[in-house]
Amino acid sequence: MKIEITGRDTGTRARAGKLRTSHGEFETPAFMPVGTQATVKTLSNDELKECGVQILLSNAYHLYLRPGEDIIRNAGGLHKFMGWDRPILTDSGGFQVFSLAVLRKVSDEGVEFRSHIDGSKHFLTPEKMVGFQTALGSDIMMVLDECVQYPCEHETAKRAVKRTLDWARLSKSAFKAGNGQHLFGIVQGASYKDLRQECAEELVKMDFDGYALGGLAVGEPREITREITGFTTDLLPEDKPRYLMGVGEPHDILEAVSSGIDMFDCVIPTRNGRNGTAFTSDGRFSVRNAGNSDDLRPIEEGCGCYACKNHTRSYIRHLFNTDEILGLKLVSLHNVYFYQKLMREIRKAITDGKFTEYKNERITRWISKPQVR
Amino acid sequence: MKIEITGRDTGTRARAGKLRTSHGEFETPAFMPVGTQATVKTLSNDELKECGVQILLSNAYHLYLRPGEDIIRNAGGLHKFMGWDRPILTDSGGFQVFSLAVLRKVSDEGVEFRSHIDGSKHFLTPEKMVGFQTALGSDIMMVLDECVQYPCEHETAKRAVKRTLDWARLSKSAFKAGNGQHLFGIVQGASYKDLRQECAEELVKMDFDGYALGGLAVGEPREITREITGFTTDLLPEDKPRYLMGVGEPHDILEAVSSGIDMFDCVIPTRNGRNGTAFTSDGRFSVRNAGNSDDLRPIEEGCGCYACKNHTRSYIRHLFNTDEILGLKLVSLHNVYFYQKLMREIRKAITDGKFTEYKNERITRWISKPQVR
């Protein structure tokens, strides 16, 4: 897997490109909505496509527990199981095991844990997660990594990097290239540059199809996220895709794109959609606010999404007020559309040589009006 | 409002027809999905249209409480508020006041109650509900009636019929014809033929645009529902639409169509959809059953709905198993589609002179296989 660069910004390290998979290509910088349990919450596949989604993310950890490998294999893989024919990236489950599961024991071989759902005991290994993601048929699969919490001592972070590198080697050995699937390594190292550097350099030697930055946006100050993102991205090869995991807010995405990041995923658009927070070019607002009760404007004037073309804030506020599911769907849909539109604008700004201008204009606007009615 | 009869069955009183409203015509026998709070739960308007829905029902009682008249008036009426441009029938709220609200006092003037939502006190009168439904812009509005519970003494039912007739007169006087809206009377009388007869005859004298049968399918044996439906329908004018409120199961609909009923509404397809029960031509089944976990068939083979064209039982079962909203939507959508398809088939069978054959074939099949896998 090589990224085909279609445009570069002059003032920053931002780049636009394309990545090809056996389920079609997707453009970068790309934002992947999160379909944790083989569904992007509240949205149908057709709705995702109408929003312009070219690739989505699903979580191997969740799928491993429910519905499990047999059922997905029986359907012919994850694409067929969920009826999505475009690219899918699956997270290995590292982050989930270390954040959701009741953790039992991490060893050189893997991690033993109890399911957060039913307490059942499981043992995940790097090899097993490559095997599982191979069965899923993920276009891009991620290695199992050890995630640490923030804040984290240097010593702890160092041990996690060592294990992450060991597991990356085991994953790479277990991975069978040539069937159209790709494997990304994950750079860990918390907020320590020496560890990030060691991890990145070792992973690059192993020659993965792409490289992710893990363990960021987990509670550290935004300046550290940016500093480490920029520092680490500079250590990664130019011809391979770079993926900043779990990020983020629109302005975080703009900053990371400046550093040369190509791929993003985050639950922000969908989770916020379900609690009634809508993103717009002028900032975000809650449709639940009483002030929207008689507001006949759409969520965002001029927006081309189904919610904005068909419904008013007044109606959507009523749906939230009466606990109607359609409300959750409409704001989720708008937010997913908004994020895809943001990525289209970013790509265009880069190829037009106007990225810095675009980024500054956006960020100034969002900072000056963090909340609009 | 007159019903344009387009076909009659020879063996039964079943008839097919058309009704015109200022939001377009709809074909009868018609089934109206229930959009209690200005939304058919989980479904968008586009999805309803794809299912073939020509008219839907909403509840004046709920809309009166939330969002209230001002907000709907501000939007330009219920159609604009909810973005639905096809016909809407609104129930007056009689049934809801007598079943959901904390009832305070029924008088000749109206009914005082406390909201089931926040305990706020309200006083509904027949005139006020006509006024409210006029503001909603309902294509068909219903008079406020007094509903009794089953079982019910003759004396109680008689008093309720008297009040229902008094309120019908007040409603008729308050109703201003000529703006494209229509007003239906509601026949009450519990399971007493003498009361049903008196109520029907008095209402017919008042000359409503159509007539509904209320207070049926509220717990009485199915034979009584059928007996009273047949008996009452025979007392209603041939040239006016007849609406059996709150019914029902597919086989109840077939029986009522035989008696000459033209319109139906019921929460069954959507409520069952949300609990995972799917209707098919071979009966109903629960997609939650473990047996569906690896079943790669759609809910119903050959069904043209979005759920069946795109997803397997295995996937939908997984969605229910993991509490994903998409699951509720997919089965609701299938059921609404199934009901619309049933009505299309009923109309065709009537105009083809094969209704009795169709009805018997269906009922035999459903009775022989009440639950299929």
Image (tube, coloured by chain):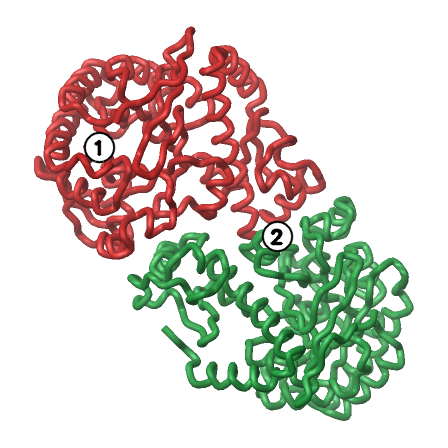
Chain colours: A red, B green
Q: Is the N terminus of chain A in the top left, top right, bottom left or bottom right quadrant? A: top left
Residue A261, given in percent of the width and then of the height, sits at 35, 20
Compared with A190, B277 (above or below) is below
> Is there any visible trace of residue B260 in the rendered image?
yes
Q: As drawn, is B364 to the left or to the right of A300? A: left
Residue that appears at 46% across and 68% down: B278
Q: Is label 1 on the same chain as label 2?
A: no
Q: Nearer the viewer, residue A125 or B130?
A: A125
Name the quadrant of the C terminus of chain A. Answer: top right
Q: Which residue is mark 1?
A: A183
| Chain bearing mark 1 | A
Mark 1 nearby-residue class (10 Å; few <14, some 14–19, many ≥20): many
Q: Amino acid at mark 2?
A: Asn
Which residue corresponds to mark 2? Answer: B45
Q: How many marks?
A: 2
Of B157 and A131, which appears nearest the observer? A131
Q: Is residue B169 above or below residue A257?
A: below
